[in-house]
Image (cartoon, rainbow, N blue to C red):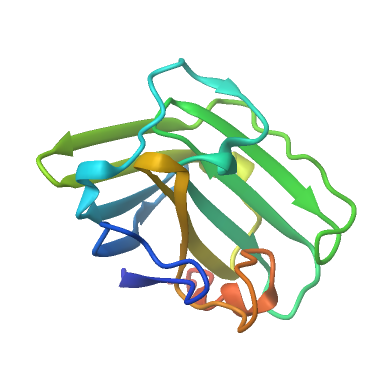
Amino acid sequence: METFDLTAHSAHPAKFVSAVAARILSLDANWLTLRWKVEGAGALVVPPFAGRARTDGLWQTTCFELFVKAPGGEAYAEFNLSPSERWAAYDFAGYRAGMAQRPVERAPVCTPRRGGSVLIFDAAIPASALPSLPWAYGLTTVIEEEGGHKSYWAIAHPPHKPDFHDPACFAATLAAPQPA
């Protein structure tokens, strides 16, 4: 599957982070696995381990996110995944409207690995928590660096301000499997 070089929104550039790449590693009957790679991460604020639990507000610091919807549809799902192992999942009926907790029967698995100036963040989301294929999706990241400096990274951005819920951010597609 394709690796995407995410870009920081021009209104909120990073201080030291030089690149963020993200990709879907695999999707099978049980798990969707994702990977983000952050380069220039020496001053990155990484939330400390807190254990697996559903938690709101994760986007207020370094957080990795997946937005998924049916192509052309209004409703979408949002998954927030933290290096702390905390996570959140929401359903929206339309653009920032009708927000509700998305049912997730098994907690996602979040695995950060940090070395020098690189952070690798892997996440596995239970396939049962995901909408049916095909998808329009966005892989996004909120980056917090020392001193509270934040940048907002996505495959594509709306022009004026960072807003991962904007339809422009659903820039990637994943087709439904073809029958054999």
Q: Residue at x 60, y 40 (%)?
A: 128
Q: Give the x, y percent position of residue 43.
A: 26, 43
Q: Residue at x 41, y 67 (%)?
A: 13
* Quadrant including the C terminus: bottom left
* Quadrant including the N terminus: bottom left
Q: Is residue 24 above or below residue 149?
A: below
Residue 142 seen from this side: no
Picture quadrant of residue 162? bottom right
Picture quadrant of residue 20? bottom left
Q: Residue at x 57, y 43 (%)?
A: 59
- Give the farthest residue toward the bottom: 159
Q: Give the x, y percent position of residue 56.
A: 67, 32
Q: Which of these two is toward me, 52 or 117?
A: 117
Q: Give the x, y percent position of residue 157.
A: 55, 77
Q: Which of these two is toward me, 122 or 117?
A: 117
Residue 144 seen from this side: yes
156 on left or right of 54? left
Q: Give the x, y percent position of residue 9.
A: 49, 72
